[in-house]
Image (cartoon, rainbow, N blue to C red):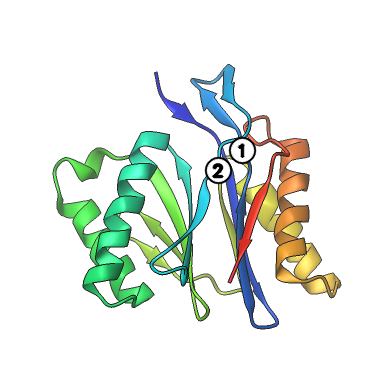
Amino acid sequence: MEFRGTTICAVRRNGKVCIGGDGQVTMGQHSIMKNNAVKVRKIYKDTVLSGFAGSVADAFSLTEKFENKLEENSGNLKKAAVALAQLWRSDKALRTLDALMLVADKDDILLISGNGEVIEPDEDYTAIGSGGNYAYAAATALYNNTELEAKDIVKKSLEIAGNICVYTNEHITVIEL
């Protein structure tokens, strides 16, 4: 049985970058197993934010591998992301891992996927996961029509997604650099 279901949102504004996620872990498509999981954290000497959506065990494994790539690349976010994407796509065991990652530092926000993609969003915000489209739409509206700080946009976007997506709840964790 797969454990999944989450929404992650990242926003950069006024020299700050924030990432946040809801706390729901869903088993299969019908059962909520946990309401207060934390799926975002600071890594690499508290200079990088990471968040994941997808299979929990797979995401933990990928986060650990990403931290190793940050160490190997002296904290260079883009190089570490490309190295992880290459490893993820080429390694026979890793290729089956089912998750997406959002990572950010003071300069960049990146989405990393198992298809070998490292995507830098066009905007200073993005979202992934089951409620990602809802959070992204909310972040777009809030970013372009308010003066809210990054952490407030992340929190409000996740709250909106939690009101729409059954795989997203309102137990929200937001961290900031």
| Residue at the right extreme, as displayed | 146
- Where is residue 76 shown, x and y percent of the image? 34, 78
Assess disc 2: are there few (<14), some (14-19) or many (≥20) residues with their C-alpha within 10 Å of its C-alpha: some
- Residue 163 in view here: yes
Q: Which mark is residue 69?
A: none
Q: Are marks 2 and 1 in contact (CB under 8 Å)?
A: yes
Please state which amino acid type lies under the numbered disc 2.
Val
> Which image quadrant: the C terminus?
bottom right
Question: In the displayed structure, does residue 151 sit left or right of residue 62?
Answer: right
Q: Inspect the image, locate mark 1, and give the three-letter code of the amino acid beneath it.
A: Gly
The percent position of residue 106, horizontal first and vertical second, equals 53, 79
Residue 160 in the image: above or below residue 77: above
Q: Determine the residue positioned at 53% across, 52% down.
A: 40
Instruction: Give the residue pinned by disc 1.
Output: 23
**Is residue 116 in view?**
no
Which residue is painted at 82% across and 70% down in the image? Answer: 148
Characterize the local packing of mark 1: few (<14), some (14-19) or many (20 or more) Cα atoms within 10 angstroms: many
Question: Left or right: 141 with respect to 10?
Answer: right
Which of disc 1 and disc 2 is earlier in sequence? 1
Residue 38 numbered mark, or none: 2
In-image side of 69 versus 112 (left or right): left
- The secondary element bearing badge 2 is classed as loop
Per the image, label 1 sits on a secondary structure element best described as loop
Q: Residue at x 65, y 56 (%)?
A: 174
Residue 72 x/y as whole percent: 21, 71
Q: Nearer the viewer, residue 151 or 27?
A: 151
| Residue 169, picture quadrant | top right
Quarter where residue 119 is shown:
bottom left
| Label 2 – label 1 distance at C-alpha | 6 Å
Position of residue 17 relative to residue 88, above or below, is: below
Query: Residue 132 placed where, x, y %?
Result: 61, 48
Residue 172 position (above or below residue 49): above
